[in-house]
Every structure is written in C-alpha cells, then in structure tokens.
Image (cartoon, rainbow, N blue to C red):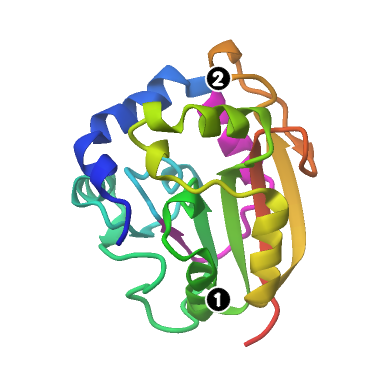
Amino acid sequence: MPKTEPFEHFYQRYEHWFEKHYSAYLSEIDALKKVIPDGKGIEIGTGTGRFSIPFGIKYGIEPSLKMARIAKSRGIQIVRGIAEKLPVKNNQFDFVLMVTTICFVDDLKRSFEETARILKKDGYIVLGYIDKNSPLGQFYLRHKDQNPFYKYATFYSTEEVVSLLKETGFGDFVFYQTIFRMLDQIKEPEPVIEGYGKGSFVALRAKKLSG
C-alpha cells in the first residue's frame, strides 16, 4: 500500500518544512537544475508541487488527496496514483522527476520499470534523494521513529539506486550533490558539486537505453 497516511495527516507540517529550511530547499533546486533536461516532464510523487513548479512541470502523479489538492491549486494537472502502477500511457514523456519519493514507494524496482514504460525513447529519469550513507541520511535513520514521515521510509544508498536503475534499463548516469551540513546549520544555499559521496542530497539523471 502507498505510504500516504502521514502526508494526509501532516501535510501542513510538510509545507512548513520548506519555509523553515528554505535555504536547504533552494540548494536542492540548484542541484536538480544541473540534471533537468528539456522537454515534456511529469513528476511522480508531486506532493504539493514544490519541485514541479520551479521547473515548469505541468503534470503530476500523487496518491495523497490533500497533497494533490494543493498541487492542483498551484496549476499542476494531477492524477492520483502510485509509482508502481502509473495511470499513464506508454512513451508519453521526455523526462520523469521523482524527488524524495523513492524512499516512500513499496517496490522501487517496479517503480523504475513503470517510469521506463511512460518515457519516450531516449527519455530521462531524474531523481532527488537523501543518500542513506550520508550524514543526514544516517541522522534520519537514527531518528526514524521520531519523524511522522521518515518512520515509514526506506532509505537507499546511491549504489543501490544505480543498481536498480541498471536492472530496469537505464544508463548514462550524471550526478550532482549538495547539503553538506545538518539542516539547522544551513542559513544560505549550499554549493552544488558534481558526483556523490560527500553531499547528503543527490540529484541523479539516467537515460532510458531501450524502447
């Protein structure tokens, strides 16, 4: 079952996070700018639209009713659904964006297979996530039970994500990273550098290699 319950009950807390940690949010946007391609995109796990809007993404998939309503009010065309069974026809989009979504799906491999299905030939998947092996990832793991969202999350290392993407037909990887301090220490946007392994937030782009 999709892990929608905390997002239904704590959607205001979700929104408040972006206000409280605005500089960290801007850092994540800056990292994603490095890997967002041109073309028609859709976000899977749109939430309230905080990542679709900066990139002009007009389409989204979101299982939470309350989150979907907020995203719709911000001009995004939302269809309720889950990553493992996308209500989208084959070969529709140039890129798919998933930001902090992979840790909340039930079957990540199946989600990547579905993403590949709805992408056009040579389309891209773009991921933004907290690396399990990073300082912030380890902090979230230690305090999972104290957070209404992350208590339901499954965190992944970049190596695990890449392995699953390769299994589902993706390649030509590009990585950027940011968030080098704990969130309460970030008072202005963090730098963005190529690669992964130092920053807690990873922006990854991979190309669909078949079909």
> Going 29% across and 27% down the picture, which residue do you hit?
13
On whether residue 29 falls in the magenta region, the answer is yes
* Quadrant (top left/top right/bottom left/bottom right) for the C terminus: bottom right
Q: Horizontal placement of 13 versus 135: left or right?
A: left
Where residue 93 appears, x then y in whole percent? 50, 72
Q: Find disc 2 in the rendering and name its residue.
A: 183
Mark 1, other Cα within 10 Å: few <14 / some 14–19 / many ≥20: many
For numbered disc 1, what is the local secondary structure? Answer: helix
Give the camera-side residue of 40 and 14.
Answer: 14
For badge 2, the amino acid type reads Leu
Where residue 40 appears, x then y in whole percent? 50, 66
> Going 65% across and 67% down the picture, which residue do you hit?
165
Mark 2, other Cα within 10 Å: few <14 / some 14–19 / many ≥20: some
Q: Is residue 137 above or below residue 176?
A: above
Q: Is residue 27 at all visible to an observer of this figure? A: no
Q: Horizontal placement of 126 versus 194: left or right?
A: left
For badge 1, the amino acid type reads Ala
* Quadrant (top left/top right/bottom left/bottom right) for the N terminus: bottom left
Q: Is residue 85 at all visible to an observer of this figure? A: yes
For the residues carrying marks 1 and 2, which lies nearer the camera in this image? Answer: 2
Q: Find disc 1 in the rendering and name its residue.
A: 116
Q: Is residue 100 above or below residue 146?
A: below
Q: Quadrant of residue 80?
A: bottom left
Where residue 16 appears, x then y in whole percent? 33, 24
Q: Is residue 21 above or below residue 162?
A: above
On whether residue 189 falls in the magenta region, the answer is no
Q: CA distance from mark 1 to mark 2?
A: 33 Å
Q: Start and end of the magenta stretch?
A: 24-44
For numbered disc 2, what is the local secondary structure? Answer: helix
For the residues bearing labels 1 and 2, Cβ distance under 8 angstroms: no
